[in-house]
Amino acid sequence: MTARSLGVVMLFAAALLCTACTDAESTAPARQAHSDLVVGTQPPIAAVPHLDSIANLTLPIDVYRFSAAQTKMIGSASVLLVNECVRRFGFPPLLTDTYGPGASSLTRRYGVTESEIAEQYGYHVAPQENISTPKDSTGQRFTRAEMLVLSGSDSGIAAAPGDPAPSGAVHSGMPIPPGGCYAEARKKISADDPADTNLASEIARAGFDQAQADTRVTAVFAQWSACMRERGYTAADPLAIAATADLSLPTPRSAEIQTAVADVACKREHNVVGVWFTVESAYQNALIQRHLEKLTVTRRQLDAEVRNAAAVLGLPVPR
């Protein structure tokens, strides 16, 4: 009998049930943005604040994406609904709610920015950053019957949201909902108007890429690079130096910690975070104004999903 690992199925569940995942704009290579996501001239900026930390900062586009608290709520509500659905078919709960508080959209966006993290963890992830990492869950497997009820497919290949289960598919004498319990849960949260966060994610990525190439940012990168050179390190920008760390090691080596400490010191000396954040925010604001009508619809959809998830859990709506 064919079985699927929990890890594979949970990847499907995350894509289907949690549309609030944080973007990885700062880790993927730069790409050419579509023309309607390109700001033709450098957007003006006001006075640049001196920022030694990203704590309590938010980017303009975050208004049109789920917050960390909202992401957790939607994930938890989705797991609850799926488990309620599979119980109708005689199964015990098949999913575990592992949704933590989540990371800020700015976490590691500009590399390591906190001295205490650099001094203790180097470029490794610190627990207080709330960055979840994949875990090997291959020890738990689903049977074909469980897969059929969960996803609407017993072949080990999850059906797309809304795809019907095989014709006449039943379990325990009951018809399986179209798309399985995953799709049923998703529909209860999003109704027939699911939030489309693709545009917000594209703006976040485009703003990040264009800010990196902005002369105001490249100028401060040059200052940071000279500062690092004085300390014995050679790197063009903060993300390049962070990429040299061997994160496969369980703990950072002393050399990594020393590099990270120097990195943060040079960021603070030349206000790298302040300039970078201010310029990126300007690009995002320009793109938000260009796409405001669509983004307003997205915000309405997000609010509806959060309200529905809160109702499922019997909790107040988080901000």
Image: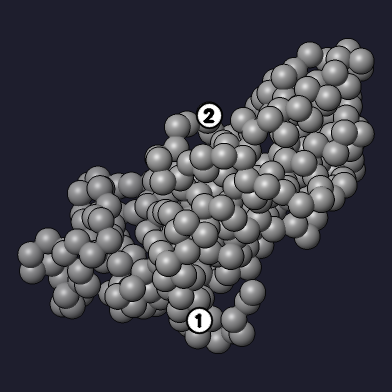
Q: On the image, which quarter does residue 207 sit in?
A: top right
Which of the numbered marks, if any, corresponds to residue 52? none
User: What residue appears at the point 36 percent right and 69 percent down from the top-left corner?
Assistant: 194
Image position of 266 (left or right of 165) = right
Q: Amino acid at mark 1?
A: Arg
The nearer-to-camera label among 1 and 2 is: 2
- Pointer 1: residues within 10 angstroms few (<14), some, or many (20+)? many
304 or 46, nearer to the observer: 46
- Image quarter of the C terminus: bottom right
Position of residue 265 relative to residue 80, above or below, is above
Q: CA distance from mark 1 to mark 2?
A: 36 Å
Which residue is located at x 63 percent, y 68 percent?
Answer: 69
- Label 1 SS: helix
Residue drawn where x is 65% and y is 50% of the image: 282
Tell me the residue that label 2 is attached to.
29
Front residue of 157 and 255: 255
Q: Is residue 94 visible?
A: no
Quarter of the image for residue 101 reads bottom right
- As drawn, the residue found furthest toward the left would be 167
Query: Where 160 falls versus 120 (above or below)?
Result: below
Where is 20 relative to 121, above or below?
A: below
Is 91 on the left-hand or right-hand side of 307? left
Q: Return the x and y of residue 141 as percentages of the image width and height.
A: 38, 50
The answer to which of 4 and 172 lies nearer the viewer is: 4
- Residue found 41% across the figure and 64% down from its top: 294
If you read the primary sequence from the N terminus, does the residue marked by circle 1 or circle 2 appear first?
A: 2
Asked whether the beta carbons under mark 1 and mark 2 sit within 8 Å of each other, the answer is: no
Mark 2 Cα within 10 Å, few/some/many (few <14, many 20+)? few
Does the rendering let one see residue 301? yes
Q: Hey, which quadrant is residue 214 in on the image?
A: top right
Tag 2: amino acid = Pro
Residue for badge 1: 307
